[in-house]
Amino acid sequence: MFASPIFSSPESLALWLAPQLLTLWALLLLTLTGALGLLMRQPAQTDVPTTAAGSPWRRLVWALPALALFGGLASQIGPGQPLSRFDRALSQALGQQMDLGTLQAFALPTWLGNPAPVTVLTIGVTLFLLWRRERLQAGIWLLGVLGNTLLNWSLKQGFARVRPSHLHGVVVETGYSFPSGHASGVLVTYGLLAWLLLQHSPRRWHLLVLLACGALVLTAPVSRVLLQVHYASDVLAGLASGSVWLLLCLSLAEGLRQRQALGR
C-alpha cells in the first residue's frame, strides 16, 4: 500500500521522467562541474618511474561494470520487455512535450557527434600529431575513433533495433538504433581529444578541457533522447560500449608508452 504510482509500471515511470529530464540533465552538469573542480584542486602528481607505474591494464577493471550494463540493457530491449515499454513511453511523452526551441537548442550538441565534424576533427588532429612527430598518439587516436565506428556499426547490425519515430523535422535519422553511435562516438572521440589536450596544454587549461569534454559527453547523449532519435537504453548502451573501447585504447597507449620508455 506504500507503493508509489510512479513506479507502478514502466509507462508511468516514463511519464513522470519526461518533464524532469531537462532538470536532471542540469543537475548532472552541476555535479560534474563540482566534481572536476574538486579534482583539479588536488596538487599535481610528480612523474612516477616507469618501473613503479604498475600494469597499464589495471584501469580495465572499470570496464566490467560497463560490460555488465551493456549486457543487461541488451537483454531487455525485446518487444514487450519492461525496458522496451519504458523506452517507447518516454519517447512518445517527449514527442508531445518538447517545444521547437528546446529541440533546436539540443541539435547543436547532436551535430558535434555527426560524421562530418568528427571526420574533420579526426583528420585535423591526426595531421597535427604527425607534424609533432607523436606517432604513438596519432595511432591511438585513429584506432579509437575508427575502431569505435566499426564496433558500433557491427553492434547495430547485430541487434537491428528500429529507431523511435521522430516527426519534428529538427533532426532526421535513419538506420538502426541500438546502441547509440552518437553516445559512444562522442565519448570516445572527445574523451581521446581531452586526453591529448591534457598532454599538450599547460595545467591551467586542464579544468576547462575536462569541463568542456565532460559537458559534451553528457549533453550529446541526452540530446539524442530529447530529439527522439534514440531510446534511452540506446544511449546508455552506447555510453557503456564507448567506455569499454576508450579504456582499451587508453590502456594500450599506456602500455606502449611504458614499453618505449623501457627500451630507451
Image: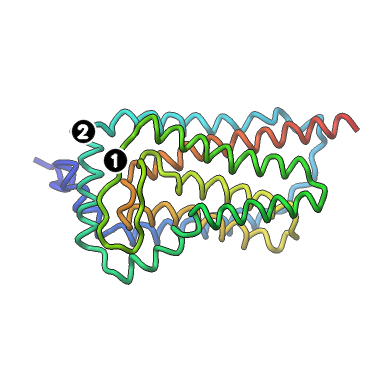
Question: Hey, what amino acid is under mark 1?
Answer: Val
Label 2 sits on what residue type?
A: Pro
Q: Which mark is residue 79?
A: 2
Q: Residue at x 42, y 56 (%)?
A: 28
Identify the residue at horizontal 25%, vertical 51% (top origin): 165
**Which x, y percent locates residue 108?**
45, 64
160 or 239, which is in the foreground?
160
Residue 84 position, x and y percent, is 24, 38
In the image, farthest residue toward the bottom: 101
State the residue lying farthest toward the left: 1
Q: Number of marks in the image? A: 2
The mark that comes first in sequence, 1 or 2, is: 2
Q: In front: 76, or 141?
A: 141
Q: What kind of element bears circle 2?
A: loop
Q: Secondary structure at mark 1?
A: loop
Q: Which image quarter: residue 175? A: top left
Quarter of the C terminus within the rendering:
top right
Q: 168 or 88, which is in the foreground?
A: 168
Give the residue at mark 1.
162
